[in-house]
Image (spheres, rainbow, N blue to C red):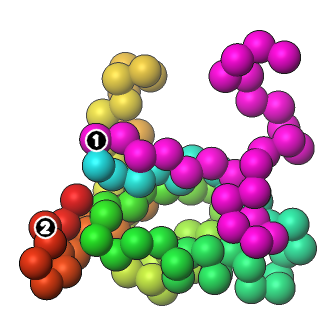
Amino acid sequence: MEEGLLILGQEPHIAPGVRGYTMEIDGELYVPLVIADRPGNGDVGRYLDGLPTDHTVKFPNVISDKLRGMLLCRGFIDSEEWAPEWHCMCDVMVRRGQARAGKAAR
């Protein structure tokens, strides 16, 4: 398999019962893909609740109405940002990091 090649169905587990990808870019967390092993049992919600609040977290191009609702309930807002790899603006749902006592937000 080529390095960096993504194969549908072979996503790594990023939390119990949740597959997908989370990456840190310039101190911000990007979650471009989230898949529940057993939809509806709460694993994705627990994953979302466990995301760090001191980091800005972004979900690009959310196409699932269910995921969108889950993110809105957790304080994410609609935004957009420049995607240099696509040479265009990209929809993102974002929750800005909040500083903790003695630490700056990222």
Q: Which mark is residue 26?
A: 1
The answer to whether one can see residue 69 in this image is no
Magenta segment: does it hold 32? no
Instruction: Please indicate whether residue 4 sits to the left or right of residue 19 in the image.
Output: left
Residue at point 80% right, 70% down?
Answer: 17
Determine the secondary structure under disc 2.
loop
Q: Counting other residues with Cα less than 10 Å from the Cα at mark 1, is it few (<14), some (14-19), or many (20 or more)?
A: few
Q: Who is closer to the viewer here, 106 or 32? A: 106
- Regarding mark 1 in the picture, which secondary structure is present there? loop
Which residue sits furthest top?
Answer: 2
The image shows residue 92 at horizontal and vertical percentages of: 41, 52
Query: Mark 1–mark 2 contact, CB under 8 Å?
Result: no
Which residues are drawn in magenta? 1-26
Indicate the amino acid at tag 1. Asp
| Amino acid type of the residue tagged 2 in the rendering | Ala
Q: Could you say where residue 61 lies in the image, as x and y percent from the top left? A: 53, 48
- Ranked by sequence position, the earlier of labels 1 and 2 is 1
Residue 80 visible in the snapshot:
yes
Above or below: residue 8 compared with residue 80: above
Image vertical order of residue 2 relative to residue 37, above or below = above
Of the 4 image quadrants, the one containing the N terminus is: top right
Distance between mark 1 and mark 2 Cα atoms? 14 Å
Which quadrant does the C terminus fall into?
bottom left
The structure residue drawn at horizontal position 53% and vertical position 82%, both measured from the top left corner, is 49
Question: Between residues 24 and 35, which one lies in front from this camera angle?
Answer: 24
Q: Where residue 90 appears, x then y in whole percent?
A: 41, 40
Q: Pointer 2: what residue?
A: 104
Residue with the most extreme front position: 102
Picture mark count: 2
Task: Name the residue located 29 percent from the left edge and 49 percent from the top edge.
Answer: 27
Q: Residues within 10 Å of mark 2 (few under 14, many from 20)?
A: few
